[in-house]
Amino acid sequence: MVTEEKITGVVLARYRLGTVLVWSGVITWVPFIVLRMVGEKPSLFLFLPFHLIGVLSGARLRAIARKELTGVLSGILFLGLSYLINRKAVLQT
């Protein structure tokens, strides 16, 4: 049976995977920078496709997951705010 907990877990996994993809796209430039520091002249076109695949697909995946999480997070935020408001009212009496 599909529950809200399982759906949230899948969405968070997508968000984490998107973050990993973005960072892998950024870290792609480390060998390029090291080779440039050593004095080699590596081709930019060898590294750029991997960078773009990682960063663009990761950003897209994170945006989709964030959009799916908005409903869940807004509900959690509403519950938290209502708890704080009720707690404040109870403490005042």
Image (tube, rainbow, N blue to C red):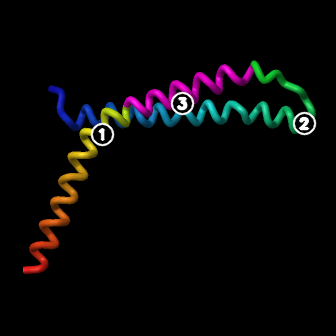
Q: Residue 92: name its quadrant.
A: bottom left
SS of the residue under disc 3 = helix
Q: Which residue is mark 2?
A: 38
Residue 89 placement, left or right of 61: left
Q: What's the distance in space between the residues labelled 1 and 2, CA to CA? A: 46 Å
Sooner in the amino-acid sequence: mark 3 or mark 1: 3
State the count of labels.
Answer: 3
Q: Earlier in the sequence, mark 2 or mark 3?
A: 3
Left or right position of 90 against 47: left
The residue shown at (13%, 78%) is 91
Q: Nearer the viewer, residue 9 or 57?
A: 57
On the image, numbered disc 1 is attached to which residue?
Answer: 70
Q: Is residue 45 left or right of residue 35?
A: left
Q: Nearer the viewer, mark 1 or mark 2?
A: 1
- The amino acid marked with disc number 1 is Thr
- Tag 2, which secondary structure? helix
Q: Residue at x 60, y 32 (%)?
A: 24
Real-space CA distance between mark 3 and mark 1, rounded to the nearest whole angstrom:
21 Å
What label does residue 58 carry, if any? none
Where on the picture, by quarter, is residue 68?
top left
Given contact means CB atoms under 8 Å apart, are the residues at marks 1 and 2 in contact? Answer: no
